[in-house]
Image (cartoon, coloured by chain):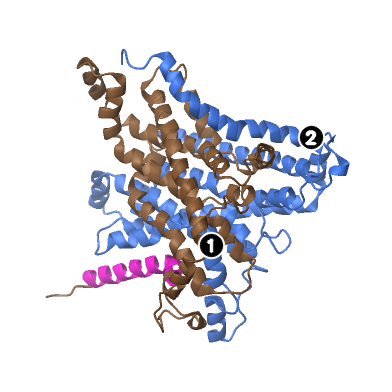
Amino acid sequence: MKITAKKVRRFVGIILIWLVAILWCFPLIYMFITSFKLEADVVPPSLLIQHFTLSNYAIVLQQEIVHYVVDSLTITLSTVAVCLLVGVPTAYAIVFGKLKNPDNLFFWFLSTTLLPPVAVIVPMFLLFKFTGLLDTVGGMILIYSGVNIPIVIWMTRSFLLDVPTEVLESAEIDGASRVKSFFSIVLPLARMGIISTALLVFIFVWNEFFFAINLTYVNAAPVPVYMASFMTQEGLFWAKLSAISTIVVLPPLVLGWIAQRSLVKGLTMGAVKG
Amino acid sequence: MENHLTKRQSRLLTLPAILIVALVTQAPILFTLGLSFVHWIIVRPDLGITFYGLNNYVEIFTSGDFYGVVANTVLITVLSLAFCTLLGILFGLMLNRHFPGINIVRTLIISPFFVMDAVAGIIWRTLMLNSSFGFNGYFAQLLHVKPIDFFGVYSLLTIILLIVWQWTPFFVLIILAGFQSISEEILDSAKVDGTGWFRELISIRLPAIANHIEVAILLGLIFILKVFGLIYVTTRGGPGYSSANLPYYDYKVAFLGWDVGHSAAIAVVTVIITLVAIMSLFRWFRRRSKEAAA
């Protein structure tokens, strides 16, 4: 086999790309490695695991982290459900319905995503305090729904615009009811888009920090609030910290890997073509 | 489409979404605007709530902290966007080819985007940049130099580093989609002309994905202006306010000083700055693409 200069160059290029990718992800890779180390082996930093152990995970899973994960799951899954239940029909009405100004309504929803959360935090805090919603799961679901419904509408609309109207028309000629054509035609066609929208909202809510830290204390505190408490603890248990971190970043990571393709499509469509 | 949804049904379907979004985002903003004209410190109930006119705004614009924080916000935003765009194009080019393990490489590069701020900040603060036990200290010892003071002198740069680490993947996703949408014909014609690789990139590929780059920058701007968690878990805006942006500054006034009126006024100013920044960038891109089309 003849090794040409071109082949060598290609090979070196690929190695370089691999190196860059590994370096970029290195903090996460190293966090993963550290989570299997003994606390005594954490310093000095090393890529090798001197003594492999699962004890960090065992210890961590017996602590209060479980309670925070349950809160996070409750808040996140409920928010995703509310956002889809409310957002998808709205996008459907904007695309296929008879609204006076569907574009205006759409841009109104879109404009709310521009606002920085600090713009609403003080009134929300006061409102929550006086209505007893402060530090409750229900309060968090409400605020996260308000923030993420526009994102669901934004993305779902992109995917609904892809549904060919002829298909819907022919269904109507066949006498399918609106409800039926929505469930038997539109939903299946836009299924992948709606699923990836749900995954994106899951990731956003699971990771959200600002509202979580300001509107919860103990009863409804989700994972990010727990992670932030490590900031103040100076007793450093980096192996356990890494184990906890690995557990809490895993759900959004896996969902993100699944959703990456349609995520781009949903967020950029219209914007790129328009 | 005839006989589909009636007007009434359409409106009914949109009503719940409008109500929830208005309750959570629109109503509080009006409330914030109102609060910005009162003097109200929650931890001093003896002072009560009094009308304060424009004094909250006067206090903001005459305080030294505010201008520093605005400068930080501008620096963080502009530098982060610049690096994210450059790296996004670079990584996009890298990933826009076929080689063994391309899916794994792409997954590695985009992963930081899905990691919560709280964890990203803590991992960098401890395992990576800690000056005694992290890689920062390790390499300093190895090279017999002082570890870099990431959370003191360079705290603002640290914040930018973390934002770039988290947000470059987002740019890569969008820019890569752009590169993949360029038709083969355009590239083939360039090959026939004998255009060099770099010339081809500058004069053909990049103009072809201008829209994608603009979308990435606009969305990036919207999100980077809101950055809060990364600052909270790494530098706490410090030392002083040297690495605080507007959201973090406002948080400190609201929840550490409990000064409702003052923080509401900062929030109003933040909203105005945010909207002006986003709208001007949007207009600029619009004008540019019209000129390009003409």
Rendered image quadrant of residue B52: top right
Q: Which residue is mark 1?
A: A64
- The three-letter amino acid code for the residue at tag 1 is Glu
> In the rendering, at what x and y percent does residue A244 appear?
48, 65
- The three-letter amino acid code for the residue at tag 2 is Phe
In the figure, the brown chain has which letter? A
Classified by dominant secondary structure, the portion drawn in magenta counts as helix
Residue A24 in the magenta stretch? The answer is yes
Q: Work out whether residue B29 can be spotted.
A: yes
Residue sitting at x 27%, y 34%: A188
- State the residue in front, B102 or A167: A167
At numbered mark 2, what does the secondary structure look like: helix, strand or loop?
loop
Residue sitting at x 27%, y 18%: A177
- State the residue in front, B107 or B16: B16
Image: B17 above or below A81 = above
Residue B289 in the magenta stretch? The answer is no
Image: B9 above or below A160 = above
> In the rendering, at what x and y percent does residue A195 appear?
34, 42
Image: A159 above or below B179 = above
Query: Which contiguous range is marked in magenta?
Result: A6-31
Q: Name the chain letter of the residue that bears numbered label 1.
A: A
Disc 2 crowd rating (10 Å Cα; few below 14, some 14-19, many 20+) is many
> In the rendering, at what x and y percent does residue A27 appear?
46, 68
Name the outermost residue toward the left. Answer: A1
Q: Name the chain letter of the residue that bears numbered label 2.
A: B
Q: Nearer the viewer, mark 1 or mark 2?
A: 1
- State the residue in front, A131 or A156: A131
Residue sitting at x 57%, y 68%: B125
Q: Which residue is mark 2?
A: B37
